[in-house]
Amino acid sequence: MNSYDLVDVINRHKLREILDKFTEATGLAAIMTDRRGRNITDPSNFTRHCMMVRSTKRGKLGCYASDARLGKLSVKKGGPAIEPCHCGIVDLAAPLIVEGRCYGYVLCGQVSIGPPDDKSIENARKRAKLFGLDPDEYLKAFMEIKLVPQSQVLSAGEMLHIFSNYIVELGVNSLMQQRLMEEQYRRSELENAVKSLELKALQSQVNPHFIFNTLNMAARLAYLENARQTSDVIYSLASLLRYSIRNLDQFVSLREEISYIRHYLYIQQIRYKDRIQAKVDIPEALLDFFIPVMSVQPIVENAIKHGLENKKEGGMLVIKAMDEGNAIAIDIIDNGVGMSPKKLDEINNPLHEKNGHTTGLGIPNVDLRFKRYFGSEYGISIESQENMGTKVRLRFPKTMKGG
């Protein structure tokens, strides 16, 4: 659903010309308002009575409230609705609806469908005092209001409704086309920026499809949502890219590795909306110990791609760390589709290296790196059951310095 307002999609000058022609042909007054009853066009052929009422603060508020109430009634009816305003004269409202969304209302009328009686004249004098207007002058303006058959008001309102909806629909479609072109331009600029990065390390470590999918998603968000969320996505992607081009022999603090994971999870949660939830629970006391760069992300990606992505209702991913004295254990747990014993055996076999990760690393490579750095007692262990989920444990010794 787009977030355009009526003022975004119409040419007010052109619409005012159309309303002027309508009022000239029908003798009715006309105006267009937004969903809250606020005027979008200047009054067209308004009666002297209504201009007097709207010249007062109390009268104007009453007119806005009447317009909004009548507009909502027209939406409820699904077409033009007619009823007296707060001053007792007849108005008609028709909703401006494009693709199921109401942008505002077109109102016309300011007529009477019968001659004023003694009670309506008495009420007019009371309103004049309420608005702070001269009673005699106000009553004179009230008596000048034209008498028009209700059928004529309805017919004219139907015609204005059809034409105004057509104009608004054209405006919405034009604006959507303009925003789409802007989106395509931004996406092209982002893709060109990525393509221009002559970084062989980036090419060897990051799957280009992930980059472009994320950038496309960010461009769509710029079109569908406000700029704040889009900037957050692009910021997370930039942080992810900066981190991923590091040398794989480099060590970083667990704090930095987890910060990178949070950016990665943010992008994935935006991508999958509410289907995937994540919780990160790392004790503060463990965050300053060092870990080989890009160690946790391949495991997290594997949990999403092979565990949660294939689960129709989505699920939960939990990342938690535990102090084991001289070592640290990080568990990456998902409640996804899990694995059969045969598949689990293949994964645990270091000869079966798997591809398809954003980093191009894969779980077997992470395990081999840890065993090379720290010894055979460290690395990855996996537990999984079909339809129950998977737990991957990553163990490494405590160290406060790289290498």
Image (tube, helix red, strand yellow):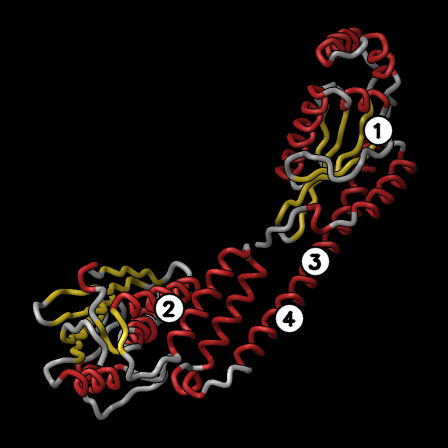
Q: Any mark on residue 71, and which?
A: none
Instruction: From the image, tell me which residue sits under label 3.
Output: 175
Contact between labelled residues 3 and 4, with CB atoms less than 8 Å apart: no
Q: Residues within 10 Å of mark 2 (few under 14, many from 20)?
A: some
Contact between labelled residues 3 and 1, with CB atoms less than 8 Å apart: no
Contact between labelled residues 1 and 2, with CB atoms less than 8 Å apart: no
Describe the element under mark 1 as helix, strand or loop: loop
Mark 2 or mark 1: which comes first in sequence?
Answer: 1
Disc 3 to disc 2, C-alpha distance: 33 Å
Disc 1 to disc 4, C-alpha distance: 45 Å
Instruction: From the image, tell me which residue sits under label 1.
Output: 46
Disc 4 to disc 2, C-alpha distance: 25 Å
Q: Nearer the viewer, residue 334 or 252?
A: 252
Mark 4 or mark 3: which comes first in sequence?
Answer: 3
Mark 3 or mark 2: which comes first in sequence?
Answer: 3
Mark 1 or mark 4: which comes first in sequence?
Answer: 1
Q: Nearer the viewer, residue 5 or 331?
A: 331
Image-quadrant location for residue 383: bottom left
Instruction: From the image, tell me which residue sits under label 2.
Output: 264
Describe the element under mark 4 as helix, strand or loop: helix
Disc 1 to disc 3, C-alpha distance: 31 Å
Q: Any mark on residue 185, and which?
A: 4
Q: Image quadrant for the N terminus?
A: bottom right
In the rendered image, the vertical position of residue 293 relative to residue 139, given as above or below: below
Q: In this rendering, which labeled residue sits more in front, label 3 or label 2? A: 2
In x, y percent, where is residue 172?
70, 55
Disc 4 to disc 3, C-alpha distance: 15 Å
